[in-house]
Image (cartoon, rainbow, N blue to C red):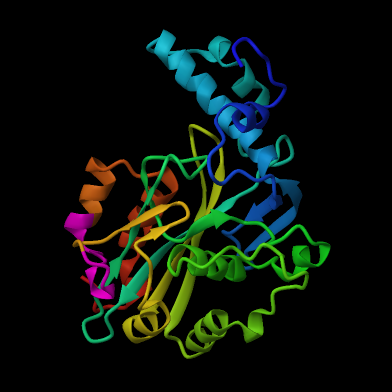
Amino acid sequence: MSGKRYDRYTSAIRYLDPPALFENRPSYRLVDADLASTKPRLRFGLGTYFDKLDLSEAIAHELAGAANRKSEPGWEDLPLRGLVGDPFDLRRRAVMPAIETLTLRRNTDTGQATFFLHWRDPAKVATAAGIYGLIPAGEFQPSTIATWDRENDFDLWRNIVREYSEELLGEPERDGSQGVPLDYESWPLYRGLQTARTAGKVRPFCLGIGLDTLTLTATILTAVVIDDDVFDTLFGDFVAVNAEGHLVTASDTTAVTDGLPFDEPCVHRLLTDEPMASPGACILDRAWRLRHQLLGRQAG
């Protein structure tokens, strides 16, 4: 509505141009982090997804508008961002981190790997639209609004597996319509990944936490190495299009062997010439630097 003012950024989006996925779900709020000590820790409270958007998207638009008016905007042009203060002070604002994962399908014969990109369709998503990201990626939040799921889903690995089911297999989100907690141990995908993880054939890694300079949103940066036989068994029928966009592979087919090569030319091209979201770019860069630790000494 022309001239109408809204008290929240998300209110304006909801009434003016809502994307297909736009729900104010409960989310885990990061309140403390220390990944550098001998006993790494993350501490969380609770918040909502819109708490995140109302600040992060607003300050991004504020900076973009100021940059259109000035080649070098100053703090006087960024009053909302100025109110944030120290962006690393988790007490001053609600920080609801996402989790983004580089999935490396490791060839057990050669030690080489492939991976997949996700193009985020602007008509389907509220953030990071029209660019490439890694897959899977999603908010760290309970699967439902039910109180019991705040504890049942409070696990980074469980969150990643839920995103695998949605983004790679095209399964519907587990939205609590059954009225009972998700039984992870009896879920075939989760059980299969857990069994392979125990056997050392699935290896998840946390690479740190990234803070986007434009939106100040936080992302827990992860990588999961999956041996090819396990990947092909669990994800052999992955979908080309999902609820947020479509997968990008090395060819027009969706065979599992057509993932992008995890090699220096491909990584360099994506980091320098393609529109990649900053969390995915950070993960890709860091994972390449740590490729021998992730994949073993056979990696190129």
* x then y, percent, for residue 94: 70, 40
Query: Magenta stretch: residue 86 in it?
Result: no
Residue bounds of the magenta highlight: 253-266
- Front residue (pair 75, 241): 241
* Left or right side of 202 for 253: left
- Front residue (pair 202, 297): 202
Location of residue 58 (image quadrant): top right
Residue at the image position 40 percent from the left and 76 percent from the top? 235
Decide: is 187 above or below 14. Answer: below
Picture mark count: 0
- Front residue (pair 185, 285): 185
Residue furthest to the right: 147
Residue at the image position 23 percent from the left and 69 percent from the top? 258
Decide: is 118 above or below 73. Answer: below
The N terminus lies in quadrant: top right
Location of residue 84 (image quadrant): top right
User: Is residue 31 in view?
Assistant: no
Residue at the image position 37 percent from the left and 76 percent from the top? 237
* x then y, percent, for residue 192: 51, 86
Query: Magenta stretch: residue 255 in it?
Result: yes
